[in-house]
Image: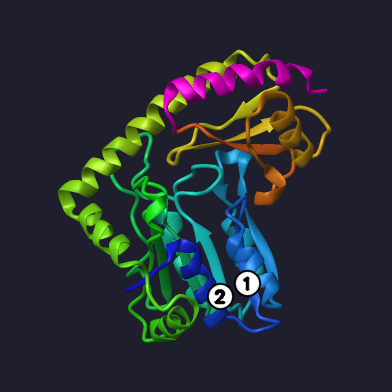
């Protein structure tokens, strides 16, 4: 295990260590696009496989098999997924591992939302250990709710982890001593469970409020219920680009959302619903008249 300055440093070290210009990198979309951007900046060929909204955001594994051609360097997945909240089934996980092994790719699993499950108290299984060439990335920022500590990690049983370590020493030297101490406290079994319980409570209360609000938007907005995460990925019924919709919400409602195009899916936006319900209620109430204007 390598402890990093947040999951963002772990992802940066992984792409820098494993990828070279011209390498093929396959990413899950819609998805968190940090690895996508890092790989593009590295000069890689980046292609996507889709999560299918018509099938409840299940992955198109036939598409993954087609785009993960022999020699593919890296496959990136986010599970539970940001922004959709979809959790891969264990059968889907096994098939993704098999595809990575067949094409010789490294599998990078962004697992920062493990522990934020909405429908169960069972923690989402990890990809770590399912094959030698898998790197699991985690963080205290999301399900632990401790983003200010800036502690993340990369877990891998392959000797290649040493190359990440060298980059960590070059990028950051070390994580903060106080951050490390508080992270140790948070990761103790009893504390960890309390933090996850807190997170799941916020997720469940927030989604209940959000889903009730969504029903009152006269079909202008639709969303599939997330299985995990403090997020909802929302489809809107108008022709405006998602960046313009996000800017409209910011200017007229003072509410920030993330445009769907930044996750590889136009016509959608991501909203955080895992906050204090009073605060969330104010934001949703402010959004309603602006949503009514969408044409």
Which is more toward the observer, 192 or 267?
Answer: 192
Q: Quadrant of the C terminus?
A: top right
Marking on residue 15: 2
Q: Which mark is residue 272?
A: none
Number of callouts in the render? 2
State the CA–CA distance, disc 1 to disc 2: 10 Å
**Prevalent SS, magenta region:** helix
Instruction: Give the quarter of the image for residue 55.
Output: top right
Q: Nearer the viewer, mark 1 or mark 2?
A: 2
What colour scheme does the image use? rainbow
Where is 279 relative to 256, above or below?
Answer: above
Mark 1 or mark 2, earlier in chain: 2
Asked whether, in this view, residue 223 is left or right of residue 40, the answer is left
Residue 22 in the image: state x and y as whole percent. 71, 82
- Residue beneath disc 1: 25
**Quadrant housing residue 90:** bottom left
Q: What span is in magenta? A: 275-295
At mark 2, the secondary structure is helix
């Amino acid at each position: 295990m390598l402890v990093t300055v947040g999951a963002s440093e772990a992802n940066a070290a992984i792409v820098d260590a494993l990828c070279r210009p011209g390498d093929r990198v396959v990413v899950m979309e819609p998805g968190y696009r940090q690895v996508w951007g890092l790989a593009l900046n590295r000069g890689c060929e980046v292609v996507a496989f889709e999560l299918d909204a018509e099938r409840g955001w299940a992955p198109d594994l036939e598409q993954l098999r087609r785009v993960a051609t022999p020699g593919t360097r890296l496959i990136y997945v986010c599970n539970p997924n940001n922004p959709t909240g979809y959790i891969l089934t264990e059968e889907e996980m096994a098939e993704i591992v098999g595809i990575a092994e067949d094409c010789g790719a490294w599998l990078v699993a962004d697992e920062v939302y493990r522990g934020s499950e909405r429908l169960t108290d069972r923690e989402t299984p990890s990809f770590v250990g399912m094959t030698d060439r898998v790197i699991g990335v985690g963080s205290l920022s999301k399900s632990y709710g401790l983003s200010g500590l800036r502690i993340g990690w990369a877990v891998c049983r392959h000797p290649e982890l040493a190359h990440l370590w060298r980059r960590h020493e070059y990028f950051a030297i070390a994580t903060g001593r106080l951050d490390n101490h508080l992270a140790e406290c948070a990761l103790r079994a009893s504390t960890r469970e309390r933090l996850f319980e807190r997170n799941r409570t916020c997720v469940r209360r927030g989604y209940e409020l959000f889903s009730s609000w969504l029903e009152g938007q006269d079909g202008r907005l639709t969303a599939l219920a997330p299985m995990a995460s403090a997020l909802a990925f929302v489809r809107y019924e108008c022709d405006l680009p998602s960046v313009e919709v996000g800017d409209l919400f910011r200017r007229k409602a003072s509410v920030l959302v993330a445009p769907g195009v930044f996750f590889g899916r136009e016509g959608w936006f991501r909203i955080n619903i895992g906050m204090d319900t009073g605060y969330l209620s104010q934001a949703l109430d402010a959004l309603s008249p602006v949503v009514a204007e969408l044409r």
